Image (cartoon, coloured by chain):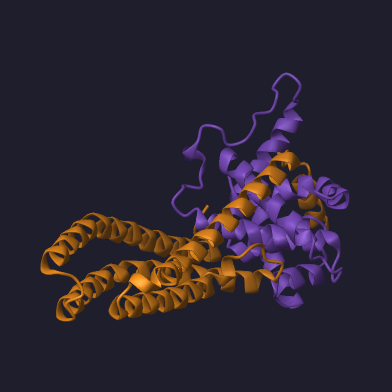
Amino acid sequence: MSEGQDSLSQLWQKQKVEQADLLEVTKKWRKVRLKQRFYVLLDFLSLAIPFAIIWFKADKLDSFTTSMLIALAVVGVAMVVYITWLRRFSLGWSNSSTEQHIQQLQKQIQNNIKIANFSLQSVWLVVILSVLLYVCLYYFQVFPPEKLKDKIVFTVSFNAIVLPCIWVWAARRKSRFSRELAELEQLLHGKNS
Amino acid sequence: MSTDFSQILQAHSALLGRVAATYEANFHLRQELLQDITLAVWQALQKFKGDSSVKTYVLRVAHNKAITHVAYHAKQPRNDSYCEIEAPKPNLQTTTDEQLGQQQQIQNMLKVIRNMPIQTRQVVTMSMEGLSYHEIADACGISNSNAGVILNRARKVLMESI
């Protein structure tokens, strides 16, 4: 080691630093683990609901509604699998080399942008699916006209309130992840402090 | 938390504090980063297979976590203006001029390091933590000669800054 490097190292080691509170770290870990389990539970519940309806209400459901619920459940499973796959790099810590870690991090942020975009586009998909659903319900005469009208009013009102919120939320997430990716690029090239 | 892991974390706590200081100038964000790094290291220690020294392994995980942290905090400014406290102020009554000068040099050095590309930051700080070229290259995922080139350039810049 050269003298210059030695003096730099000595100076570096004299730095006054804060120390982590290990008790706080343990508490944080419990909180993180609880949060992760809660998310898994939410994913499971969102998938279980259509199956539960089919299971418990099978005798009261007509064949069209049953088919729709099965299709919804299958699409739901596929979506959860796809989103989990896109999130795979964000699970936990990384002990790989930093070069690999940075590549994974870039990939993860790109995937987060894909997930946000997916949420954004799903708004249009819900509108189209709702229209298709009610066309089918009308065509197969699943409900009496009055009941169908009530259901349409409810769905349109629900979509008018909820879908714009999802749109804004997803658009913000997309722009946040894009900013994070740009920030990471800057950090890699040393333009940020 | 197992006693062994606690002991390892205690033994490396100052080192982890220095890694956090390499990436965050802001006092509050640095505290948050330090907690995140410590948690990541604690989790990672459970998978430690002894392929490298504990210190190298701890530094690798800590730097990886710090990079993730700074990338995911793009919204927040990472400079001194974000909060009033950048670092705990030294006690002026018991601090000599020499110590004050030294702390000033360290602050200058940190400012320069925080402006460096991530890979350069990692190489230079790992070197100042006493890691060999081989250990640095292994942790960063680059060749020994590349680590040497990066280190020599960074060292020149740092010497000029202090």
x, y percentage for residue A90?
A: 57, 65
Question: Which sits in the foreground, A188 or A83?
Answer: A83
Q: Is there any visible trace of residue B100 in the rendered image?
A: yes
Q: Residue at x 80, y 69 (%)?
A: B135
The chain letter of the orange chain reads: A
- Residue B66, x across and y down, in percent: 63, 56
**Residue reaching furthest front?**
A59
Please name whichever residue, B161 or A156, is drawn nearer the observer in this view of the structure: A156
* B34 lies left or right of B13: left
Q: Is residue A180 above or below residue B10?
A: below
Give residue A57's position: percent from left, percent from top: 39, 68
Tell whether B96 sits left or right of A88: right
Residue at (60% x, 62% y) in the render: B118
Classify residue A128 by image quadrant: bottom left
Quadrant in the rendering for residue A74: bottom left
Q: Residue at x 18, y 81 (%)?
A: A140
Q: How many marks?
A: 0
Q: Nearer the viewer, residue B92 or B78?
A: B78
**A51 or A26, which lies in front?**
A51
Which quadrant of the structure image shows residue B145? Answer: bottom right
> Which chain wears purple?
B
Residue A115 rendering spot, x and y as whole percentages: 42, 69
Q: Which residue extends farthest top?
A: B93
Q: Is residue A42 left or right of residue A159?
A: right
| Residue at 54% in and 60% down | A41
Residue B115 seen anywhere in this rendered image of the structure: no
The N terminus of chain A sits in image quarter? bottom right
